Amino acid sequence: MNNGFKDTNIGPIPVEWDLLEADEIKAEGRSIISGPFGSNISRKFFVESGIPVIRGNNLTTDMDRFKDKDFVFLTKEKADELNTYAEIDDIIFTAAGTLGQVGIIENDMKYDKYIISNKQLRLRINSKILKPLFAFYWFSSPWMIKFIEQHNTGSTIPLINLSVLKKLPIPIPSLNEQKRISNILDSLDQKIKLNRQINQRLESIGQAIFKHWFVDFEFPDENSNPYKSSGGEMVDSELGEIPKGWDVGMLGDLLKIEIGGDWGRDEKFDNSVKVVCLRGVDLRKLKTFGHSKEAPIRWVKKSSLLKRELTNCDILIGASGLGPVGRSLYFSEEINKIYPIPIIYSNFCKRLKAQSPETANYSERFIDFFTKRVGLKVILLERPFQIWILKA
């Protein structure tokens, strides 16, 4: 291939780059290992504190480097016996379950060392060939996640083994170029992290305002003073005192259940159209981060799209599958602009429709608030018309 690139089995790469396999970039010694046999790291060995055990909940497919929390622990003696340690700059892969989960142990972690569970694999990098952070970015990239998924060796439970790990391809620029690429991606990561913190803070502020206005009834009165504490008139209702002029009704007074979702097919077929198909886990990511790059691309009948294309009068609720059950999302016009193709929802979601965008927005905030604070998930999903709701 011309123009400074060469063909490889992962596609064109710069001519001065090499293409190696994971087994060729490992450090000396016991560098590529699997976790211990399941019975050697079962619940009976867990203790209150000690050496933390890395499990699937500590890794993601979102290019998050590592979730340094929610551990179980082993004694140092048991950890030494297992000898499946993960230390600074080690790359961790999920071997069973959610394939494509990848993490890296960095020097600012809470613990000096960890133990990988029976469902993880560990790769220790030869730093003379490869920068560990560059390796993490490559192995956690969407292209590599798909590659790993395609090499699933399991039948009922998705699996990869050491043989698969050893053969994972990775392009090798010079060390200086690896550092430049990693620095750019790291800078973007820090901006993303900051944006997530801002989004979470704004969501918390929104929750606090909702409670102040619609639970404590301290919304601004005509003089911009808090209504209830400024002597605003209250009247009795089935829910207790509410502001005069407000009603108590059912969620079903404001919303109606729409047609169920459509998971569609993996590939194009006659009279089909390509869509983004939202799942419960995508609702959480859209609400928290403003995007879900993992939202599946599917093919559905054109007639199905006409029935299920979302508008700004719609609310989606995660009903099953991945992601927190009961998670809700108001489908704003901004969300509709995120993807270049139409958006529908899978059969893992329920869709509720309001008569106006304002009613949909208010209802979703009500659902979100009480799901988080009171725990109405089951009622919301099974009897959505039986939730009391205040109507101003």
Image (cartoon, grey):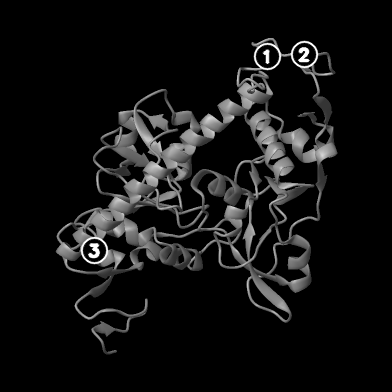
Coordinates of residue 166 in the picture (x, y in percent): 34, 64
In the rendered view, does 185 fall on the left or right side of 371?
left
Q: Say which quadrant the N terminus sits in.
A: bottom left
Q: Nearer the viewer, residue 369 or 125?
A: 369
Q: Residue furthest front?
A: 223
Q: Is residue 358 above or below residue 168?
A: above
In the picture shown, does residue 88 fall above or below 111? below
Q: Secondary structure at mark 3?
A: loop
* For discs 2 and 3, the disc positioned in front in the rendered view: 2
Q: Earlier in the sequence, mark 3 or mark 1?
A: 3
Q: Residues within 10 Å of mark 1 (few under 14, many from 20)?
A: some
Residue that badge 1 annotates = 228
Residue at x 54% of width, y 61% of height: 154
The residue mark sitting in front, 3 or 1, is 1
Q: Which residue is mark 2?
A: 234
Q: Are marks 1 and 2 in contact (CB under 8 Å)?
A: yes
Tag 2: Cα neighbours inside 10 Å, few (<14), some, or many (≥20)? some
Above or below: residue 120 compared with residue 152: above
Q: Position of residue 52 (x, y in %)?
A: 37, 33
Disc 1 on helix, strand or loop? loop
Q: Earlier in the sequence, mark 2 or mark 3?
A: 3
Q: Nearer the viewer, residue 226 or 336?
A: 226
Earlier-in-chain disc, 1 versus 2: 1
